């Protein structure tokens, strides 16, 4: 699926010495399958329109290609339609959230 290809592209760029900031990806909340964001180093909460589950493990989340641990690194709220990180991801890193359900 497309979302896994994006994750592989980010991982390849980062592992080759580049930065995830070198990858341009547009968020597609209209499909509701994945969302991408560029971190600013301060923001901890990002909008996830159209989600139905608050179970963190229902989402694969990576920051610059590094998979994050559900309920430890982030939480999900279907009520607030958002993901909240325990710590703000570093500036210019790419956040990828993929819905698994």
Image (cartoon, grey):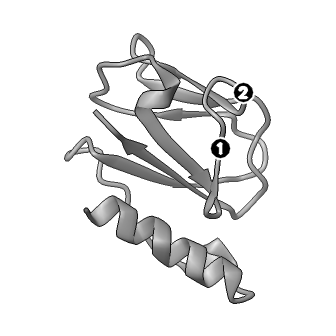
Place of residue 93 in the rendered image (x, y in percent of width and height, measured from the top left): 68, 62
Kindly check if marks 2 and 1 are in contact, taking CB atoms under 8 A apart as contact. yes
Figure disc tally: 2
Q: Residue at x 38, y 63 (%)?
A: 4
Quadrant of the rendered image containing residue 16? bottom right
Which SS class for mark 1?
A: loop
Q: Residue at x 72, y 27 (%)?
A: 72
Quadrant of the rendered image containing residue 84? top right
> Which residue is more in the foreground, 55 or 25?
55
Separation of marks 2 and 1 at Cα, in angstroms? 8 Å
Q: Is residue 30 left or right of residue 13?
A: left
Q: Residue at x 29, y 19 (%)?
A: 52
Place of residue 2 in the rendered image (x, y in percent of width and height, measured from the top left): 28, 65
Q: Residue furthest bottom?
A: 16
**Looking at the image, is 83 positioned above or below residue 26?**
above
Place of residue 74 in the rendered image (x, y in percent of width and height, measured from the top left): 64, 30
Q: Is residue 53 left or right of residue 72?
A: left
Place of residue 78 in the rendered image (x, y in percent of width and height, measured from the top left): 39, 16
> Which residue is more in the foreground, 81 or 70?
70
Name the residue beneath numbered marker 2.
72
The C terminus lies in quadrant: top left
**Looking at the image, is 46 positioned above or below residue 81?**
below
Q: Is residue 83 left or right of residue 2?
A: right
Name the residue beneath numbered marker 1.
68
Which SS class for mark 2?
A: loop
The N terminus lies in quadrant: bottom left
Density class for disc 1 (Cα within 10 Å; few <14, some 14-19, many ≥20) is: some
Q: Residue at x 20, y 47 (%)?
A: 31
């Amino acid at each position: 699926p497309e979302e896994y290809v994006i994750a592989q592209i980010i991982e390849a760029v980062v592992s080759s010495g580049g930065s995830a900031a070198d990858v341009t990806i547009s968020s597609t909340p209209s499909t509701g399958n994945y969302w991408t964001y560029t971190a600013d180093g301060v923001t901890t909460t990002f909008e996830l329109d159209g989600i139905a589950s608050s179970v963190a493990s229902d989402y694969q989340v990576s920051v610059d290609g590094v998979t994050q641990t559900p309920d430890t690194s982030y939480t999900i709220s279907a009520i607030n339609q958002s993901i909240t990180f325990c710590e703000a991801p570093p500036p210019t890193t790419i956040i990828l959230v993929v819905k698994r359900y």
